[in-house]
Image (cartoon, grey):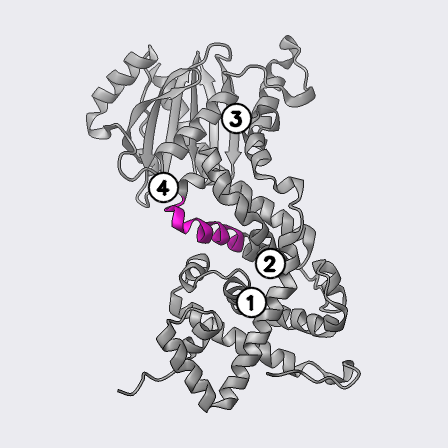
Amino acid sequence: MSSRPITEDDLNGLLDRTLDPARHAEVIAYLDAHPDVAQRIALHSEQADMLRAAFAPVIDEPVPTELDLSRMIEARHRPRRAPRWAMAAAAVLLLSVGAAGGWSLRGMTPPTSEGAQALAREAAASYATYAPDQVRPVEIRASDRDVLAAWTTKRIGRPIGIPDLTAAGYRLMGGRVVPTEHGPAALFMYDDDRGTRLVMLARPMRSERDVPMVPHADGDLNGLAWADRGLGYSLVGAIAPDRLHPLADEMRRQIRSEA
Amino acid sequence: MDQEMVRFIEPLIPALRRYARALMRERAAADDLVQDCLERAISRWHQRRHESDARAWIFAILHNLAMTRLRRSAQRPVHVALDDADAANLSLAAPQEDGLRHRELLAALARLPDEQRTVLLLVTVEELSYAETARVLDVPIGTVMSRLSRARERLAGLMCAEPRATLSPPYLRSVK
């Protein structure tokens, strides 16, 4: 039986050592019979060796400190090295209450660990956990809205309105109670026709009972956090801040008008 | 989860630096790119699909960041001349006797279109499988194969076409 014709893919396979032994032998036999092709492949092989040799020294270089992975992970957990949004949030808080409280800007120590900054962080973490979930993003679906409202009210200890964003193109998917460092919080999830998901997190605020809306961002994830009469809210989603802001405004308006 | 992430990503950092260096050519720019890549990998670790995919997954993050940057810098009028500065920028010590061919190779590599250079580097230098390379570039394997063939041909052509006049004494390529 005559062998299959030799293809360019076979020649690549020879160079990249991906051929099985039988095919390898056939390609070698072909090259023996075709010195012009053999010469070309030899040149390609030599080039590959040179490329590997040219960049090999990088592998042996000591990895720079700024690429130390453990350090990078640690830095993300440390509030002092908080992302820009946390700094912005802290700055706004300092501006709004700084004179009375007399906090020092040095070191960007947040005024408290349970305020809007923490809420924003918790909302981003909840988003990261539940928004990509294809199986069970929410515990209680929007069809059981009353059950969801009753459950969150019971666990959070006070009624939490569920804003309606249908006018803006976002449907309520449902929600759940999620843990935070500062007790249970209510999570409501929304999506639009393209499957873009938004998460709103709400929980009581003990110290910063009223906070103006402050933006936060972490990579592609944007958020807005605020507090009204002792309840803190944060709306987060992987959409542009200028699209998120009107949605947060609308939520705040509805919550205020219900209260 | 952090430990699992470190255990998986850390061993890949030298290779990520190498791919970044080959694309960006300048050490500082390359390491800056890797840093961005690691930041993203940390924050999106939960989004990767399977452990077997993790290498292609993180190379894809790096690759996409690099392409964005190269495109952005291509829009600026600044163009780095391909000359003797190349080897120095790359901080790669070439053996003295190979210096000319080494420079010639890097210059030829720099002249490949991005889509050919990236395939060639991923397959040849990073030794990713064709399937992994396809995932990194988000193209079908057939496209990887055809780009690879073209890249090899083009690189050979560019190296042969280097003006001999600049090479002295008479330069003989050793073709096995």
Secondary structure under tag 1 reads helix
Residue occupied by mark 3: A214
- Do marks 3 and 4 both belong to one polypeptide chain? yes
Q: First in sequence: mark 3 or mark 4? A: 4
Secondary structure under tag 3 reads strand
Tell me the subunit letter for badge 1. B
The CA span between labels 2 and 4 is: 29 Å
Which secondary structure type mostly characterizes the magenta part of the structure? helix
- Do marks 2 and 4 both belong to one polypeptide chain? no
- Residue at point 42%, 22% (across, down): A233
The CA span between labels 1 and 4 is: 35 Å
The quarter of the picture where the C terminus of chain A appears is top left
In depth, the one of A188 and A14 nearer the eye is A14
Tell me the subunit letter for badge 3. A
Which kind of residue does numbered mark 1 sit on? Arg
Q: Position of residue A200 (x, y in %)?
A: 38, 27
- Do marks 2 and 3 both belong to one polypeptide chain? no
The quarter of the picture where the N terminus of chain A appears is bottom left
Magenta segment: B48-64
Tell me the subunit letter for badge 2. B
Which kind of residue does numbered mark 2 sit on? Leu
Q: Nearer the viewer, mark 3 or mark 4?
A: 4
Secondary structure under tag 2 reads helix
Residue occupied by mark 2: B70
Q: Is residue A50 left or right of residue A235?
A: right
Residue occupied by mark 4: A196
